């Protein structure tokens, strides 16, 4: 999955990352889906271990353009995990109370505790994306945020949080198709907002804002992956694989029993 990584210190161009790419995966959709099932089984075991061991904290950040597939990825990648140890935090337009605080206040409150895995559906990155594109705050305010975000994520990492950030990269044509599909399906109308059309007009501004965010905030302790996301199966495969490999790398162990259990007989 290395070639989807934004290597810390190096600059990428989003236009050079193909949303249609399937990396070095040899098979097609059918093989991909089988692989996802296997990875999902492993993820379920690893998450159980994470929860039991209670030592590490996992933060998964998902960002994407509208229809980029955050909801679908959450549904499929985390299918069957233990809801006790996994939470999703969604970041919407800030409330009045949130607006009255610094932008990281609402974020810090919901980061994972020991043994937890928290998925951010949108995140503090909105404060250098939508906020920048719409000039909700002046440039001198948002431009300082990249460093602030790096410092914040460093604080989390140094206190036991593993941070993985995924940008689900779709093409503008793919977004058109997905928006049209939502429009054509009454059961998807709840997901459609006229505002999405206005945002679509700002596509290029968003791509630039994303490119900057990826280049300025991909660090050793909180790397970004640009996930080719036109193909949903490949998107889910990349996220699953990075997660499984990262969790396996932690070499977690079930905790020792609190009591000596040898020779215990249950009458
Ligand atoms: P999504 O589009 O993520 O699937 P949704 O459609 O269920 O979510 P929306 O009402 O679209 O929900 O909520 C997300 C909206 O909130 C997005 O337009 C996003 O840009 C906006 N938002 C998130 N954080 C901020 C922020 N800090 N400042 C301004 N707007 C924000
Ligand atoms: Mg939306």
Image (cartoon, rainbow, N blue to C red):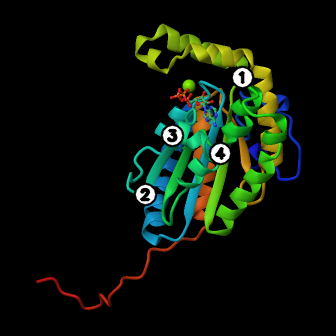
Task: Residue under label 1, please give it.
Answer: 171
- Element type at mark 1: loop
Q: Is residue 121 visible?
A: no
| Residue found at the very far right of the displayed protein | 10
* Badge number at residue 103: 4
Task: Residue under label 2, please give it.
Answer: 85
How far apart marks 1 and 4 lie (CA) works out to 29 Å
Q: What residue is drawn where x is 80% and y is 52%? A: 147
Q: Is 136 drawn above or below residue 188 in the view shown?
A: below
Q: Position of residue 248 (x, y in %)?
A: 58, 63
Q: What residue is drawn where x is 44% and y is 77%? A: 255
Pick the residue in front: 69 or 25: 69
Question: Does the numbered disc 1 mark a residue whose Cβ is under 8 Å from ligand 1?
Answer: no
Q: Earlier in the sequence, mark 2 or mark 1?
A: 2
- Element type at mark 4: loop
| Residue found at the very far top of the displayed protein | 184
Q: Nearer the viewer, mark 2 or mark 1?
A: 2
- Element type at mark 2: loop
Q: Position of residue 97 (x, y in %)?
A: 53, 42
Q: Quadrant of ligand 1?
A: top right
* Badge number at residue 74: 3
């Amino acid at each position: 999955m290395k070639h989807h990584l934004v290597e810390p210190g190096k600059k990428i161009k989003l236009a050079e990352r193909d949303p249609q790419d399937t990396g070095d995966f040899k098979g097609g959709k059918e093989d991909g889906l089988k692989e996802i099932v296997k990875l999902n089984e492993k993820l379920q075991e690893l998450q159980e271990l994470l929860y039991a061991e209670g030592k590490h904290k996992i933060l998964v950040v998902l960002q994407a353009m509208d229809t980029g597939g955050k909801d679908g990825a959450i549904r499929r990648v985390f299918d069957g995990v233990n809801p006790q140890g996994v939470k999703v935090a969604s970041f919407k337009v800030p409330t009045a109370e949130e607006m009255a605080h610094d932008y990281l206040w609402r974020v810090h409150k919901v980061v994972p505790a020991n043994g937890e895995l928290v998925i951010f559906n949108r995140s503090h990155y909105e404060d250098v994306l939508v906020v920048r594109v719409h000039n909700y705050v002046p440039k001198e305010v948002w431009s300082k945020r990249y460093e602030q975000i790096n410092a914040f994520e460093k604080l989390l990492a140094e206190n036991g949080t593993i941070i993985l950030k995924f940008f689900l990269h779709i093409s503008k044509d793919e977004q058109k198709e997905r928006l049209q599909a939502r429009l054509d399906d009454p059961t998807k109308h709840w997901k459609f907002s006229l505002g999405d059309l206005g945002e679509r007009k700002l596509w290029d501004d968003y791509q630039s804002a994303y490119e900057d965010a990826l280049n300025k905030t991909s660090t050793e302790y909180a790397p970004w992956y640009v996930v080719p996301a036109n193909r949903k199966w490949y998107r889910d495969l990349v996220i699953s694989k990075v997660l499984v490999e990262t969790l396996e790398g932690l070499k977690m162990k079930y905790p020792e029993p609190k009591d000596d259990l040898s020779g215990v007989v249950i009458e």
